[in-house]
Amino acid sequence: MRNLSKITLTLLLLFSLFLLPAAIPADDNPSAGYNNYQALTNALKQVAGQNTKITKLTSIGKTLKGRDLWMLRVSGVKGPSPFEKQALLICGNLEGDHVIGSEVALGIAKYLVEQYGKDEKVTRVLDTRTFYIIPRLNPDGAELFFNSTLQEYSGNLKPRDEDYDWLVDEDGPEDLNGDGMITQMRVKDKEGDWFIDDKDPRLMKKKEADTPLDKLYKIYTEGIDNDGDELYNEDGQGGFNINRNFPHNFGYNPKGLGVYAASELETQALIDFMTRYVPEQKTQPHKNICGVLLFSKFDNLAAGTGIECGTPTFPQPAGVGRPTAAMGMVFMMGRRRGAAAEPQLPPPTDPQPKKTNSGDVNLFTNVSKEYKEITDIQSAQSEKPAGSLLEWAYFQFGVPAFSANLWSLRQEEQRRPPTKKEGGAQPQAVQQTTRDRAAMFRQFQMGARASAQTQASGNDEQWLKWIDEKNEGKGFVKWTKFNHKQLGEVEIGGFQPYLRVNPPADQIPALSKSHAEFALSLASQFAEITMDEPEVKKLSSNLFELKINIRNKGKFPYVTAMGQRTRNINSIMLRLKFEDDKSMKLFGGNKRNDTSSLDAGAEQEFKWVIISPPGKRIDVTLWAMNGGGTTKKTVVLK
């Protein structure tokens, strides 16, 4: 009996192995060499422990799943306090699938800490600057990169009812062929919008007017219709793309309740970190941030210069539109039944700025040029942002903001934009249901669930060329027939998840070092507001003239042109304090003078005429939170 039990148990264990999803081969696993949440946490603690005099590791918040949002502060032991030094905020991995951003941010942190006291430039910059480094702002979404079954996913893990059926996350994709990856399915359908490229059967192209009906295909994400609504994988694991959740140019494509700007814990934590007032310190300690460097899917360093916002869209269920004239036949705001409807007002205009201020164009152009020289990345691809941290940091917080996507087709690999006939996109999943509802879901699909497979529109041929010529043919899952229980015979295949978002891990060290050098250069250019030695001129026995010049020795203006519009940056303040207010009087003018900005290399002169007995002291304080903090001098009237 015991032997029979052992045999039965053994058979059950063997059978269970066949039910498990297949593991990605080690050579093809895109996460090999990357740090999951626990490994990243350990690495940050190790870096912080290397030199506790210049580092401080803190959590600025927690995710829905309880993971910490780590922030490492790095600042040298000399100079002002870390809160008075001009600061650069570095933030990565806002999109869940863009894990390379967190690796490069971690690499920068390691470089700064290890080279402090050894490398002259690193030491000099850290003694005058502060770095706030948040490697992974979306740790929940990033953790999917390390799952046994891979599916590109840019959002966090907040559940959401995406198809308005009062259920959440009930219809996600499945790994039907057991290869450990969620790719795509193509199925012949005369109502399809795609056909197989004659030159490369791996590639699907947009149909043309003369494409034979028997050549057309529909494309779906790999999986089945779990909830029987004739929609495939339309309500999978919920979540929001953090880099589309910031309150500037906000418009979030995915549907569901709770869709609003800064709705996510991660977004709230970062905004709170940057803007929170601390009563004990009587200030906003992180308002010393003078610039933001992001590693995200958006790029304004190699793909172009400046910031141009994309067009935000808002979810709207099918059939919901503007009120019609017939709706005026009901009681509305006291109007009696049958009264004529009032004429509709024109749609409101959007007051938000959407393009780089003309006064800041040169700044962005010069930084982009320097980025290309330091990193040797001459080109990149990028969509226009909408609701991104890049936009909010520049248009609302008021500081220069830059983003590098680190991994995309470069100029020599790009081609001209595809024509309407050429298409060339790896298509989105098409929903098989009524026309209105299908159109609605297609409209919303480019949100948290948008992957590089849909975002790389028009460049699939070039990626296939890169796979064949530079990646040993690895990265594309060959289309293979599969008997689908609902669709019949389909073919499963497509680009390997994460291939076009994160590079092989062996490129991380070089990317980290080059971007550490760029971050150092960027931070060193911030405004430096200094005060010359005060000059006193005796006009008569009890009358003196005091003259003080302040200068900006940095390469950036104290406040950008956009920053002057937002009025979010504290002004430069120059203040006099008399030794004896009773015997010392100003002959016109004010003891406190505020200056909103000072251009790079510019200076400003202040003069006062003071009635005072000789020998009296005046304490002069210059305060520029975004220009080096506080400078104090004392002058004697003589």
Image (cartoon, rainbow, N blue to C red):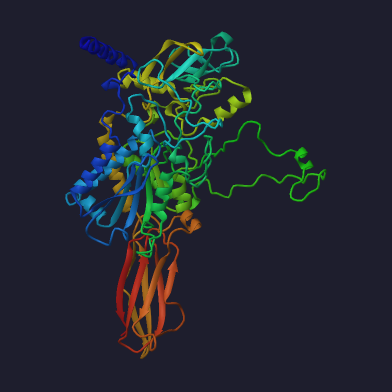
In the image, farthest residue toward the right:
338
Q: Does 141 appear above or below 121? A: above
Q: Position of residue 413 (x, y in %)?
A: 39, 26
Q: Does 255 appear above or below 585? A: above
In the image, farthest residue toward the bottom:
541
**Quadrant (top left, top right, bottom left, bottom right) of the N terminus:** top left
Q: Does 56 appear above or below 610? A: above
Q: Position of residue 70 (x, y in %)?
A: 31, 46
Q: Does 449 appear above or below 49? A: above
Is residue 98 something that shows in the picture? no
Front residue (pair 290, 239):
239
Q: Position of residue 378 (x, y in %)?
A: 36, 35
Q: Residue at x 40, y 84 (%)?
A: 610
Is residue 336 something that shows in the picture? yes
Q: In the figure, is residue 344 to the left or right of 403?
A: right
Q: Residue at x 37, y 76 (%)?
A: 576
Name which quarter of the figure residue 405 lies in. top left
Q: In the figure, is residue 25 to the left or right of 405?
A: left
Front residue (pair 449, 625):
449
Q: How many marks?
A: 0
Q: Position of residue 385 (x, y in %)?
A: 48, 40
Front residue (pair 74, 14):
14
**Quadrant (top left, top right, bottom left, bottom right) of the C terminus:** bottom left
Name which quarter of the figure residue 200 lies in. top left
In the image, farthest residue toward the left:
118
Front residue (pair 539, 351):
351
Name which quarter of the figure residue 616 lies in. bottom left
